[in-house]
């Protein structure tokens, strides 16, 4: 049934470390070999053996409108005809910047890059350059891409594979990163009392989604704003997942908390490789060539990627997409929770809008410590049963379920039914 995928994976492992170009794609944590994908449309994804799945990974967030959305494909085709890269400024970059400034409340100026990793890495450099300080605070289980300073106690694949810190990150650099428990303002206050005048920035996923989804305590997020203001540190919201997903303007709009800098990625590229970081003009104008903090990119602001991203943002700006996604999220997760309760399976469900996770744990999950208490063996059983029934979930208990506008009511009903079957096997 999965012959072609198996053969491809065998060959892939010969030429690519672990057979994948990003560790989260391998099924190591749940004991499967990954299906190789041939094509996708809407909320359906098909592997090379012809198995069709309902896709709840959505490329780890970008495909909020579903796969091969006709407007986005059209925008890409139109753009490609005029050339694929110029290494010189284009009008579509200005349009993109204007759209981002328009949509994201705290952003006055923005720089395009090629990935979320580049966005967070550059934002950290800018914060350090601007404050002339070296230390940063991050939170356990938050993932901010794979730049050296940010791989300390990270979520996502780092958590899935149980890697506490990565070899290759110089100790002298890791030492400058203070990692604290999420939702725990007291520990942040303590760190500031001790190191306040050395802390360049606090970087946080306002809705963490790389240790499963965690619901932020508003006093915690507001407290981060207050204490960074007090000490002259930069507050960075990493909205690579939450940006354009929870609201037009991301979590900062939803919670009405304005960071100094914001990192964007995933949805902003409409399925092509794009990231961005932006914020207050006073800070952003320190970037070269206007200022002296250096960051560059041969393919940054690539016209084809800009066209795909802009087409996506233009659709998200219209209508009631976020209300629709909130409703779909509510129906899906309350249905799954009810099915678990009926089957007597202990779960904790965390959800914000179209982003959610199921933890196999009977206590509230509010940080990395409690997320780690989730039962990984039960997750594997659940994951495998869902996959067999044609539901494509992230192969890790630390990743979120991503919904798109292409997931219909019937598709969601079917998913809940499959979850019932999966729970009865636990
Ligand atoms: C995915 C992710 C990143 C890294 O983005 P890449 O494009 O994979 O480099 C950074 N921060 C968060 C919150 C993410 O989810």
Image: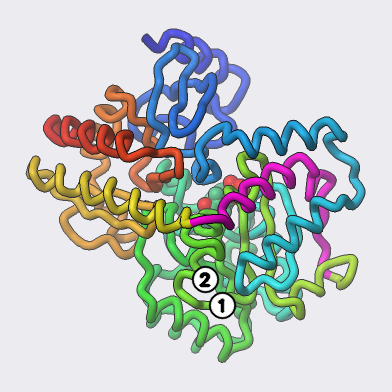
| Residue placed most toward the observer, 336 or 142 | 336
Residue 21 left/right relative to 292: left
Label 2 CA crowd tier, 10 Å (few <14, some 14–19, many 20+):
many
The quarter in which the N terminus is drawn is: top left
Q: Could you say where residue 75 lies in the image, as x and y percent from the top left?
A: 71, 38
Q: Determine which quarter of the picture holds residue 413.
A: top left
Taking the spot 73% from the left edge, 64% from the top edge, the residue there is 110
Disc 1 is placed on an element classified as loop
Quickly name the residue at label 2: 252
Determine which quarter of the picture holds residue 317: bottom right
Residue at x 22% of width, y 44% of height: 336
Residue 348: within the magenta? no
Residue 336 seen: yes
Q: Which of the pair 255/410 is nearer the observer?
A: 410
Task: Residue 309 in the image: state x and y as whole percent.
Answer: 67, 47
Q: Is residue 91 above or below residue 98?
A: above
Q: Which residues are magenta?
A: 293-319
**Sequence-earlier tag: 1 or 2:** 2
Q: Is mark 2 within 8 Å of ligand 1?
A: no
* Whether label 1 touches label 2, CB < 8 Å: yes
Residue 25 point in image, percent of width and height? 48, 33
User: Residue at label 1?
Assistant: 258
């Amino acid at each position: 049934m999965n012959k072609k995928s198996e053969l491809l994976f065998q060959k892939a492992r010969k030429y690519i470390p672990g057979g994948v170009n990003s560790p989260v794609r391998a099924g190591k944590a749940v004991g499967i070999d990954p299906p190789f994908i041939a094509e996708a449309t809407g909320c359906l994804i098909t592997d090379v053996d012809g198995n069709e799945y309902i896709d709840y990974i959505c490329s780890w967030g970008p495909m909020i409108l579903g796969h091969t959305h006709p407007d986005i494909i059209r925008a890409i085709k139109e753009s490609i005809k005029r050339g694929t890269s110029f290494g010189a400024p284009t009008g579509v970059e200005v349009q993109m910047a204007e759209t981002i400034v328009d949509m994201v409340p705290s952003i006055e100026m923005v720089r395009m890059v090629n990935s979320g990793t580049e966005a967070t890495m550059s934002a950290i450099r800018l914060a350090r350059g601007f404050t002339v300080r070296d230390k940063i605070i991050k939170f356990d289980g938050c993932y901010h891409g794979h730049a050296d300073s940010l791989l300390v106690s990270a979520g996502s694949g780092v958590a899935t594979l149980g890697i506490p810190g990565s070899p290759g990150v110089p100790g002298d650099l890791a030492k400058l990163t203070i990692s604290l428990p999420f939702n725990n303002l007291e520990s942040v206050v303590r760190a500031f009392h001790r190191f306040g005048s050395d802390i360049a920035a606090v970087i946080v996923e306002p809705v963490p989604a790389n240790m499963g989804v965690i619901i932020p305590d508003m006093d915690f997020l507001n407290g981060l704003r207050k204490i960074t203001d007090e000490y002259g540190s930069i507050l960075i919201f990493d909205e690579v997942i939450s940006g354009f997903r929870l609201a037009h303007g991301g979590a900062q709009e939803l919670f009405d908390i304005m960071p100094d800098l914001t990192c964007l990625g995933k949805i902003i590229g409409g399925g092509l490789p794009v990231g961005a970081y932006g914020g207050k003009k006073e800070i952003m104008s320190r970037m070269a060539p206007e200022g002296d903090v250096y960051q560059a990119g041969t393919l940054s602001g690539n016209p084809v990627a800009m066209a795909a991203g802009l087409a996506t943002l233009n659709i998200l700006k219209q209508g009631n997409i976020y209300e629709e996604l909130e409703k779909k999220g509510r129906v899906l997760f309350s249905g799954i929770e009810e099915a678990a309760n009926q089957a007597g399976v202990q779960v904790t469900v965390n959800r914000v809008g179209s982003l959610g996770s199921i933890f196999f744990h009977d206590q509230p999950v509010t940080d990395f410590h409690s997320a780690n208490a989730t039962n990984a063996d039960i997750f594997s059983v659940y994951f495998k049963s869902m996959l067999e029934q044609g539901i494509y979930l992230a192969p890790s208990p630390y990743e979120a379920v991503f919904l798109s506008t292409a997931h219909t009511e019937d598709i969601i009903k079917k998913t809940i039914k499959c979850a019932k079957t999966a729970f009865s096997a636990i």
